[in-house]
Amino acid sequence: MIQLIRGFKDILPGEVETWQHIEKIARSLFEDFGFREIRTPIMERTELFARSIGEDTDIVEKEMYTFADRKGDLITLRPEATAAICRSYIQHKMYADDPVKKFYTIGPMFRRERPQKGRYRQFYQINVEILGVSSALADAELIFLLKTLCERLAVKDVEARINSLGCPQCRPGFKTRLQEYIASVSDQLCTDCIRRKDRNPLRVLDCKVPTCREAMTNAPSILACLCDVCDHEFTLLQSALDRLNVPFVLDKRLVRGLDYYTRATFEIQTRSLGAQSAVAGGGRYDALVQLLGGPDIPATGFAIGFDRLAEIVQINRSEQKRKPDLYIAAMGGKSQALAFGWLCELGAKGFYAEIDFQDRSLKSQMKRAGRLEAPFVLMVGENELEKGFAILRNMSTKDQEDVPLDELVESISKRIKSYDDFNK
Ligand code: ATP
Ligand code: MG
């Protein structure tokens, strides 16, 4: 038997309804805030990610699915969406008329990391990006969207954590202080942290190894090192969140693994997911558009881990599987052919009919209709064909009535509709 690839998964009927539900709620929320959908390809030139995500990150160091295509060009399955959205924004000069653009995108991402619960090699993200706005109010809008989405999905136990990463003005000063601290605890750090401490000391702050976390407990906070502009923007973000009644906690260890992030950074965490507690992460990436060859345009955005969100969203079981409006028990080849025509006509009108193609006994067909919880069964066999009508049975009242074969679809549709209206 051929099995799926490790770290990949199927999203089966029964589960997929939760995904559809989340997607529907998310889309309508984003569209109410003026975001428009963008879809970029699943593959891009490797260079795009190497340049924007940074050579020094887990993603570029060891997680990318990179291939040489038949001509030897290096291409990569996208590990995240932001770089491609910026590539597209620049390529299509979307900044030309009005640099302010609000996008969302939903789709699969690929990272070759160690598979475990909440961590897959193909996973899905819901991304939201605001380009062209430098104000921290755009960051507040994004965090408000995340909170509202969680509310609409009845997800509890979530918490917004925020931090600032400063800017090229003030971050170097912080880095130096952090490096001094790291030097004082370096005997307690893992080999990855030791390797990164010189080039990317911020990464040591978010290392997940327990001994590293312990060692970094008393690390200095970047918030004490922010320049005036960054400090002002961070205060603006916090007061906006207060006014919007969005609770948040300051988290000095919250840093992003991606180099283009500046200023506000945030994460939505939950206690319901165990080890993989981050449901969404985001922040400002003012340096990225220019880094990719575009104009100097600020931007901010977030990515929700769709798989993790789907784990904690509960939907009504009855929404999971559509029940047939009608079951057609047709006996004999002639009746079946006729019934199949009705099924198609009903389906095209929006009424779901089920049929048995195996010509089984009426008894076993009735059993199947019961299992599928069809409210009506239409019975038709040689006898009925001769008489010119089929028998419609209401499965709850057990009432039966004759339905003339000509204009059958019309009268059945009416019957189903009034039943639906009554049961609303
Ligand atoms: P983590 O710290 O959990 O590795 P990250 O910092 O790598 O997350 P981002 O790149 O910010 O994650 O991606 C945003 C969100 O995508 C995460 O908060 C998480 O919910 C989800 N995510 C990231 N990697 C995976 C994965 N391999 N499988 C499932 N979801 C993922
Ligand atoms: Mg990661």
Image (cartoon, rainbow, N blue to C red):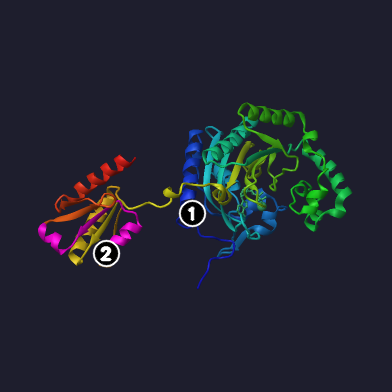
- Left or right, 360 with respect to 248, comes to left
Q: For the residue carrying disc 2, how many other residues have a C-alpha within 10 Å: few (<14), some (14-19), or many (20+)?
A: few
Which quarter shows the C terminus?
top left
Residue 235 highlighted magenta (yes or no): no
| Residue occupied by mark 1 | 15
Q: Is mark 2 within 8 Å of ligand 1?
A: no
Q: Nearer the viewer, residue 275 or 194?
A: 275
Q: Is mark 1 within 8 Å of ligand 1?
A: no
Residue 152, disc? none
Mark 2 or 1: the one toward you: 2
- Left or right, 340 with respect to 246, comes to left
Q: Nearer the viewer, residue 48 or 173?
A: 173
Magenta region: which residues? 363-387
User: Percent from the top left, x then y, of residue 187?
Assistant: 87, 54
Tell me the element at label 1.
loop
Q: CA distance from mark 2 to mark 1?
A: 32 Å
Q: Main secondary structure of the magenta part?
A: helix
User: Percent from the top left, x then y, of residue 196?
Assistant: 78, 53
- Type of residue at label 1? Glu
User: Percent from the top left, x then y, of residue 247?
Assistant: 65, 33
- Type of residue at label 2? Lys
